[in-house]
Image (cartoon, rainbow, N blue to C red):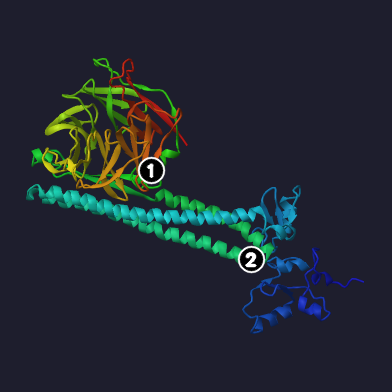
Amino acid sequence: MEVPGKKLLLKTSAVDTTYCQPCFKDGDNLPADAYCTVCKEFLCSNCASVHKKLKISRSHALLDKFSMPTSMSGDDDEYIEWCEIHPKEFIKYFCPTHQTLNCGHCVVQNHRSCHVDVISDLSQAFKDGPEYCDIDKAIAKLFKDIDKCVSDVEKNKTLIAEMSECEVSKLRRCRDEVNKYFEERENALLGIIDQMKNIDEALLDNLRPKCDNLKTEVEEIKKHLKTQENNTIQLFIKAKRAKQLLEITQTALAEINKKNTIHQYRFNIDSATERLMESNTGLGIVEKEVIDTQNALGMQIESDVDLTELKLIRAASIPVKSPIDTRDCFISSMLLLPMNMLLLADWHNDTLKLVDLQTSSMVSHVSVPGKPWGMCLLPGDRVAVTMETIIQFLETKGQLTLSDSIKVDDDCRGIAHHDGSLIVSYFSGKLQILNMKGGVIRKTEKYMNGQQVLVSPFHLIVARASQTAFVYVSDIEMNTITKLDMNLNFLQTFRDPALKGPMGISVFANQLIICCVKRNNIICINLSSGKMSQLHVEDDVIPDPEYCVYSPLQKKLYVTFNKHGHANHAENSVKVYNAIE
């Protein structure tokens, strides 16, 4: 004969009546008036009173008869998670259709038509299953993402410190060249720089603790899961809840990444300062803009793109022959300008041409007093262009407009700008650093140890490697790329069989892009590793490439060609290659 209340002590899945468990052991079947959440026992009113008085149990939380569970089976010793909807019931079931954790009441009320699983049955194999494995991987990925965010924050702090130091240094050098009249303006500009720096530092200092908090939360989730790995039921429940917490944490991390932006600002010398002491913009201005640090710590869009991993697919060309041209075009160099514009130097037609990359059309052109070869961007929407024995300055805001020019002592070719100075190469093989009025600050010797170092340095560029600026020069006769420091000291020479006839040299992020006219290819040099690789072109050959630039906005490579001296091979367009990952 079955003894009333016996089900309470049996390890079954049946629903039991709620009797006082201590009294039942003495043979009494008294209804329960309380439930101890620590001892997991139902108690009558007398036992509950004693429970509260005993030193060992007086701190235990008791649920009254209105809050306690309505039933308890033997398996309930393993169920300790309360239902959020029905606080008196334990979670025992999982609905795979709705992906919900349920008590018995939830199942009856909301899941009658569903196939509902008993958690104790599912949990046995859960720890070794793919879902728990995915959660574990998600935690590991989130740790990695958080660490990357922390690293980006630290890099930005370094960047703003270096940027502040660099811009203040330029400001100081400019200040030394003018009289005391500019003292008030100097202090104002220093205040702007300091304000920007403080704003950015305050933002980054605020983001770092948030990253640390997220990391702590994820560590807590992992810790809780680890502590429950021997209790498969509890592990299942904790893991299901952990998925929701991980999603919330991922959303919070995305918000941190979204806010992890700093201002870009630079000090630009105002041209009116040299001519007019009464200018209301005397000494210069500090320009500011926000950098998306997720895309580029180096102030480039998509700066983490490895050009050697892209497939370059030929697309439509951009025609560049204008109605006033008297000869077929020979585009000696190109320069990416703000607002998605591309400036072209047409050597044959003594013309500079402006192309809108968004519409792939030529929108402006201007005749120049010489044959344009190399170009470089200057502060304040200006460009410097080498034209035989002069360097012509050009205003690019709006229409192309010729400005002033300076004379040089030889046939100049490549040109770059750095820190208020011009670096120029010459047909004769020498390099010079000039001030903005044409005065020679420094120059290279033509011969070193009895040998000519540079023979035909037709193109050069200034690029940064590990935050330090260097000059890189292509030499078509020596088949080399030469690296120099900013004092024109020779540091390194790149040689390779694929590097034959290097001409145009441009830079994208930490990668040099070099057109090899004698090898019909384009070479990329990673400035961090020094690794030299060939770009992957659809036909594996780019005939006679003269100059190329990569636009991260358009995700295209623009290439000009050297058909100079080739009969019936006129090239009056810029070829376009789509960059496919």
Amino acid type of disc 2? Gln
> Can the viewer see residue 325 in this picture?
yes
494 displayed left or right of 394: right
543 displayed left or right of 79: left
36 displayed left or right of 330: right
Q: Position of residue 480 (x, y in %)?
A: 29, 38
In depth, the one of 175 and 336 nearer the eye is: 336
What residue sits right under mark 2 in the picture? 228
**Quadrant in which the N terminus is drawn:** bottom right
Q: Position of residue 303 (x, y in %)?
A: 38, 43
Tell me the quarter of the picture where residue 124 sits: bottom right
Amino acid type of disc 1? Ser
Which is closer to the viewer, label 1 or label 2?
1
> Can the viewer see residue 383 in this picture?
no
In depth, the one of 529 and 137 nearer the eye is: 529
Looking at the picture, does residue 110 appear above or below residue 500?
below
Residue found at x 73% / y 80%: 46
Looking at the picture, does residue 471 appear above or below residue 22?
above
In depth, the one of 568 and 396 nearer the eye is: 568
How crowded pointer 2 is (Cα within 10 Å; few <14, some 14-19, many 20+) is rated as some
For numbered disc 1, what is the local secondary structure? loop
For numbered disc 2, what is the local secondary structure? loop
Q: Position of residue 195 (x, y in %)?
A: 26, 53
Residue found at x 62% / y 78%: 59
Tell me the quarter of the picture where residue 341 sits: top left
Q: Residue furthest front?
A: 450
What residue sits right under mark 1 in the picture? 303
Callouts 1 and 2 close, C-beta under 8 Å: no
Does label 1 or label 2 sit earlier along the sequence? 2
113 displayed left or right of 225: right
Which label number is shown at residue 68? Answer: none
